[in-house]
Amino acid sequence: MSVPVAALTFPAAGWPPEAYLWFKTLHIVGVVVWFAGLFYLVRLFIYHREAEDLAPPLREAFQQQYQLMERRLANIITTPGMVVAVTMAVGLLVVNPAWLHQGWMHAKLALVVLLLAYHAFCYRLMGQLAAGSCRWSPKQLRALNELPTLLLVAVVMLVVFKGQFPTGAATWFLVALVVFMAASIQFYARWRRLRGERLAATAGTAGGTDGAAA
Ligand code: HEM
C-alpha cells in the first residue's frame, strides 16, 4: 500500500541529516554518467556496423578503432556510472526505507530492471560486433537507441511526480516529442544514405564517361 510522501520521515535513525542529500547528489551524478555512456555506446555500434560498407584496408582500421572506443566507453564510463547510480540508490533506500512502500518506487524499480537488462544486452552486442557476428542493422540499432530515452523520461517523471504521475496533455506532448525525435533520426539517416548512393552513382557515371572518352 502506498504511503503519502508528506507522511515520510527521514533520515532513518543513526544517519546524519545530510547523508540522504549526499546519496541523492551522487545518485544523480551516477545516473548522468550512466546515460551519457549508454547513449554514446549504441551510437558507436551504429558507426561500427556502417564501417562494414568501407573498402577493406579502411574497414579494418575503422572497426578496430570503434571496438577500442566501445570497450573503453563501456568499461571506464558506462558501467562505473551504473555502479555509482545503483550503489547510491541503495544508500537512499537504507537512509529512507519508507520509499520501498511507495507504488511509484515499485514502478521505478521495474523500469530500472529493464535498464539493467538493456545495459547487459549492450555488452552482448559489443561482443558480437568484436566477433563480426552482429546481425543488428544500423537502422535497428538506431531504433534500439531510443529505448533508454523512453526509460529515462519515464523514470525521471516517476521520481519527480511520485504518486501523482501525470496522464494529461503535457505527458502526451512529451511522448509525441520523443516519437518525433526518434522518427527524425531515422529519416535523417535514410536521407544521408540515399544522398551517398546518389553521389556515388553520379561519380560512377562521370568515371564511366571519362573511361569511354579515354
Ligand atoms: C537502482 C535503482 C534506483 C533506485 C532504488 C532509486 C531510488 C531513488 C530515490 C530513493 C531517490 C530520492 C527521491 C527523493 O528524494 O525524492 C531517487 C532520486 C532520483 N533518481 Fe533514482 N533510483 C534508482 C535508479 C534511477 C535511475 C535509473 C534514474 C534515471 C533514469 C534515476 C533518476 C533519479 C533522479 C533524477 C532523482 C532525483 C529526483 C529528485 O530529487 O526530485 N534513478 N532515486
Image (cartoon, grey):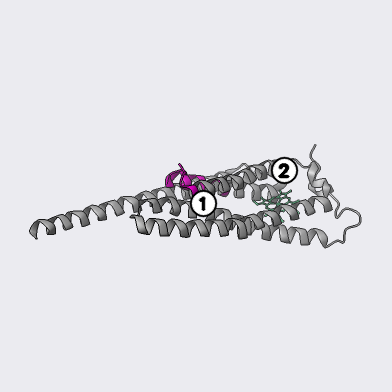
Quick check: 44 left or right of 97?
left
Q: Position of residue 60 (x, y in %)?
A: 41, 56
* Residue farthest to the right, as pictured: 14
**Residue type of the residue flagged with mark 2:** Trp
Q: Quadrant of the N terminus?
A: top right
State the residue position of label 2.
104
Q: Residue at x 51, y 48 (%)?
A: 145
Bounds of the magenta segment: 131-148
Q: Quadrant location of residue 114?
A: top right
The yes-or-no answer for disc 2 within 8 Å of ligand 1 is no
State the residue position of label 1.
42
Image label count:
2
Quick check: 34 left or right of 23?
left
Q: Position of residue 19 (x, y in %)?
A: 82, 60
Q: Nearer the viewer, residue 102 or 26?
A: 26
The tag earlier along the polypeptide, 2 or 1, is: 1
Q: Residue at x 53, y 56 (%)?
A: 70
Q: Position of residue 175 (x, y in %)?
A: 54, 45
* Residue farthest to the left, as pictured: 213
Q: Quadrant location of residue 28?
A: bottom right
Q: For residue 119: magenta?
A: no
Q: Residue at x 53, y 54 (%)?
A: 41
| Helix, strand or loop status at disc 1 | helix
The yes-or-no answer for disc 1 within 8 Å of ligand 1 is no
Q: Quadrant of the C terminus?
A: bottom left
Q: Dot 1: within a 10 Å radius of its alpha carbon, few (fewer than 14), some, or many (20 or more) residues?
A: many
**Residue type of the residue flagged with mark 1:** Val
